[in-house]
Image: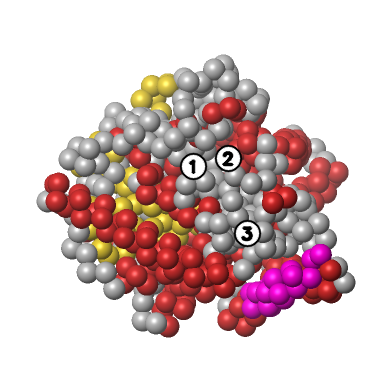
Amino acid sequence: MAGSFVLILHTHLPYVIRHGRWPHGLQWLCEAGAECYIPLLNQCYDLLDEGINARITISFSPVLLEQLADAEFPSLLESYLKERIEAAEGDSRYFKRQPDEREFVPVALFWRDWYKARLNDFTKRYDRDLVAAFRQLRDRGAIALQTCGATHGYFPLLGFDESIHAQVQVALDAHWRHFHHRPRGIWMPECAYRSGGFRKPPLSSEDASQGFRLGVEQVIAAGGMDHTIVDAHVVQAGTPVNWYVAKFKGDDALPGSSSGLPLSDPRSVYEVYKIHSSVDPSYGSVSVLARDINTALRVWSGTSGYPGNPDYLEFHKKHHRSGHRYWRVSDKENDLAKKRMYHPGVADAEVRKDAEDFVGHITKQLAEYWQTTSREGTVCLPFDTELFGHWWFEGPIFLGEVIRLLSRDEHVASRTTPEERDRRGAGLPVTLPEGSWGDGGDHRVWLNQETAWTWPVIWRLEREFLELVRSRNRENELEERGLQQMARELLLLQSSDWQFLITTGTAADYARERFREHIEAFETIAKYVRSLRQSAERLDLFDELCRIEACDRLFPNIDLDHWLWKNADEALAAPREGE
């Protein structure tokens, strides 16, 4: 045996339900459900039917779980799937009347049948409950499940350790409620890490905590978890990937992959490590697996990786009538006007070739590591789940083929992160620098000239909330109710998605609007709580509280004590929601 293949799929979207539809909002959630989550479930259950456990790890952000479990979601997804079917049928009729586009009729019928199949999967195979379908896979031993920060808050830049602690503890509650088990692993949002020690906020602020801060790993350990994921450069001290170099004027980093280290170097990405970065080890620590960036680029990159195959579906070109895609990648250098028609059958054949090539690469890498070190290695590949099916339409089929091939391989075994952590042990102790898997490997995507204004606001509201929670009257039910909704709004405000969308320009206006909406909601409820403390309840503000509760109704029975520190024993002993 040469080693292990450890695949982690990070499954996350910001809270968009009841916050817009198209082009930004609910459309994202329905697209991901149809194109990514259902096809991924199909692959896992098809493999089970063949007697193969997928042995992959799926990380779910709690904020996404809350949306998939929302009472409105099933009907919303059904409506979306039916609309896609009707749009494909309309395209078919349209193409038949257009001599120059008549060749697209078979592709329109392909989309009609594809969305009909996804509708049948959702309503019949999974009984309109995607969360239950993933839970059953875990219960049957086919996959492992991880959690994430409650709303994907960017841990290193949050102003208080209590905020990171709350992101973790609220996540554990949600994971228990949806999956009925305690996770051993956590996906740090954006794989962003910060060690412990004496620190000042990165921007001038009177609100953010200054002085001794715990390391992120210590907060994770306090939740009873024992492993997480980092990017290669964090353990290697190598050169991080930088895809958006033009966004950051004056920065001399160049686009490209990590320079890496020799296979014999003790900091190889093929090892498991235990974080030994923070000052006080009494709080505990966790193990880390590192992304093998050079192998990941084969799957992730649209220019040098498999998604750039000329026969695969072109993501960026959509038909003006319906938004369906009818073209293939063709020549990556060509503009969209020169793209040629997509042939699904040809693409399927290419998937199998690419899967064989990928498994061959993994086998070769691990064999070389064994020959060099006499140690079994770990190829750790974390990806956003939404890559597979949405950005790369053929991606779910590719994953299924890779797992099938590895199930027959004598030298490489697919393993989940808990299995690999148990097999390899806690790992070699290593001191880690700050870093993320984002552009440039640091915090620049989330803290730059375009987003700097957001952080002092977050820190101010964090401090205000902590003061209100510490001084609260636990016997006042209305005050508790108001503070619980303030907690939800603060968590939503902390989502790393807003800075990401602003920086990349993907949906900057939407992100700014959402950020300001949650500020306004928080401040409105804060006024209501203060009116209660002054024995002068304002009914107009109570009406606003009811409206906000109806819109942002995630994390029921949220525990305000999560903003008060708990050690690992207290956290594990505390009942989860639903117990």
Question: For this rendering, which residue is in front, 458 or 510?
Answer: 510
Nearer the observer: mark 2 or 3; the answer is: 3
Look at the image and say whether residue 216 sits in the magenta stretch: no
Q: Quadrant of the N terminus?
A: bottom left
* Residue position for label 2: 496
- Please, which colouring scheme is shown? secondary structure
Identity, as a three-letter code, of the amino acid under mark 2:
Ser
Classified by dominant secondary structure, the portion drawn in magenta counts as: helix
* Residue 302 in the image, given as x and y percentages of width and height: 53, 49
Q: Residue 433 appears at what percent x and percent y?
A: 35, 30
Mark 1 sits on what residue?
190
Residue pictured at 64% horizontal, 39% vertical: 501
Residue displayed at 67% across by 36% down: 505
Q: Residue at x 31, y 56 (%)?
A: 362
Residue that label 3 marks: 328
Q: Residues within 10 Å of mark 1 (few under 14, many from 20)?
A: many
Range of residues picked out in magenta: 100-118
Establish if 391 lies above or below 73: above
